Image (cartoon, coloured by chain):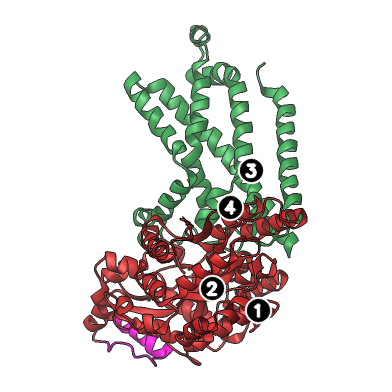
Chain colours: A red, B green
Amino acid sequence: MDQPLLSRRTLTRRHFLQATGGAALAAGLAACGGGGGSGGGSSSKELSFVYMGTAEQQATWNKLFAKFTEQHPEIKLKAEGIPLSNWGDFFNKLSTRIAGGQVPDVIQIATEGQRLFASKGLLAPLDDYITKDKSTIDEYYGDMDPNLVEWDKKYASTDGKTYYLPGEFNTMCMWYSKELFAKAGVPEPTPTWTWDDFRHACEQIKAKTGAFGYAAGPEYFAAIMPWLLTNGTSSFSDDWSKPTYDDPRVIEAADFNRKLVADKLSPPPGGTFDATTAAAQGKLAMFGGGRWPIISIRNLKATAKMGIVPWPVKAGQGSPVGWNGYPILKASKKKDDAWTFIKFLISKEGSSFFAQLGGTIVPARKSVANSQSFLEDAPKGTEYLYQALSYATPIPSPDKGAAVQKAIEDGWKQVLTGNASSSDALGKAQTTLEGLV
Amino acid sequence: MTDGATIRAVVNTFVFALASVVTHIGLGMLLALGVHRTMTRGTKYFVRTAYFFPFLVSWAAVALIWKYVLDPAFGLANYYLSTTTNWLASPTWALPTLIVVDWWHTIGYTFIILLAGLQTVPAQLHEAARVDGANAWWRFWSVTLPVMSPTIFFATVITFIGAFQIFDPMVIMTQGGPDGATRSIVQYTYEKGFQSFEVGYAAALSLVLFVVIMVVTGLQFRLSRRWVHQ
């Protein structure tokens, strides 16, 4: 679901639903809605699918599509990968197209956009199809962490209908350099390690090797949410209606991170520090990541040097999660073909492919996530990414996602740089957030 | 809350635009004079190209290059200045830093305009002034500047308008931070319109931008009657 993020700075997993997308989308809907489908709908000859993928990934996807065409020669699939680096831009581009009357049949939509797209009435409910193909769907859901199914219902719909089949996802774990831990004589982290253990490891490694312990950053998904969730709090209330960014436990988490920067256990934020490369070169002991750092780590030939472990804990285990959903557009004229295609995407065969897809995402199927195709040539502990689903929290993504993310990250940045006290900076961000929801 | 942020953005933009005009015209003039007077033909070509070159590079690339230069941990700037300043994250330094980066990027354009202006100054006038015993400073003040005044006027107007619409370096290098210290009007318009969906507010802001540019440019034209040589 994620793009291969090449540096820590872009780790914001998603720069989110930039509202450009939302705004254009809304405008497009207004334009389309009145016309009663004039110009809407896809071309009747081909089934069109739009997804986000770099040129490199598209090559892999094309193999998957070839397989689909082999199985279903009667369906002419026209898949289009849009090479953008964040979901906001992707939704923006898509909305412009929809506004212009080019409506695809199936789209790949990440958590950040799911509620927005569903609430705008763009999508056709899938419930009838699910009832019709009960055995297939039951088999799929049975091979998946039940949480994913439940979240998909709870967060990706506003009216109780099912609009998306949940697909592959990302969670957050801590990546660490086994080399540096060994050099500093610090035992490798265990799945139940605490914030104190983490801090202690940073100090030891800094003192004995001079390397940075952790790369603190202001990225909402990758560097803020894991600390909040392991401290028993979050950026928003459970239904995303109320920001909770001035919660004392949020402030505590921010202070903990600030202290890492102040004590030079982390490089100063706002620079161009590249965490993956630094870790591979033995200049950084730990950085947060989902599946996506694997590309850089493989390119740097450092898979064997790295390990993955659940995020250190203060109040309890926690991780954010975001996943891809596959909806059928309401304006689609080939809904049955679209359903066949979605069923193919979630099939075991389709799912195995995702495992090899440049490795930026975790497959939704347990059986695939635990298979060699996913665990091979990956750091020790890669299985924790799937296990994190059992205690993860969907990334809070209210409608004004881009503005929300900016407020959250700006506040955090102020704390990290030491420009403002945590209660001031986060209190101010909280006020901004309250104005946004 | 929004009012405070709007005022801050307007103030930032004015500070940026004023600093930009002063540094572009002042230092641009010095560069142009230096290149025009003291150099051989070959060096002149080289230096002219060198100064103009950054202007050809897109803002995105310029911003990224400077982010590396200004990196707090391993940037060249801190290495040579022997400091640990976090230039882009400090409320004091962020805006001045962007002014410097903007200067580096766009000075080539002002410089070329001013250089072209310098070359229009007729040599006979200088000759005549020299014969009359005027020293270099005096010749510059009474011959070069008056003849060049339309060029300087043009450069001032263009620089101001360009600077007032500044957007790219803020978005790429500081995201308007820290705490709004570098947020410009255009950036704020973008945030309001496309991130918060307050399209009406964004439209109002863009109108403010238009009015400010119109009024200031109008004022410049009005004042120009006093000093621009017709």
- The CA span between labels 2 and 4 is 52 Å
For label 2, count other residues whose C-alpha is less than 10 Å away and answer few (under 14), some (14-19) or many (20+).
many
In the rendered image, residue B78, in percent from the top left (x then y), is placed at 38, 57
Label ID, residue A43: 4
Kind of residue at badge 4: Ser
Q: Residue at x 59, y 67 (%)?
A: A328
Please give the residue where the numbered disc 1 appears in the rendered image.
A240
For label 4, count other residues whose C-alpha is less than 10 Å away and answer few (under 14), some (14-19) or many (20+).
some
Magenta range is A186-206
Please give the residue where the numbered disc 3 appears in the rendered image.
B164
Tell us which disc is closer to us: 4 or 1.
Answer: 4
Q: At numbered mark 2, what does the secondary structure look like: helix, strand or loop?
A: helix
Q: Is residue B93 visible?
A: no
Q: Residue at x 66, y 21 (%)?
A: B228
Judge left or right: residue B221 versus residue B183: right
Q: At numbered mark 4, what does the secondary structure look like: helix, strand or loop?
A: loop
Up-down: is B107 above or below A369?
above
Labels 3 and 1 positioned on one and the same chain: no
Image-quadrant location for residue A71: bottom left
Q: Residue at x 55, y 64 (%)?
A: A106
Please give the residue where the numbered disc 2 appears in the rendered image.
A415
Labels 2 and 4 positioned on one and the same chain: yes
The question of residue A196 being in magenta is answered with yes
In the rendered image, residue A126, in percent from the top left (x then y), is placed at 61, 74
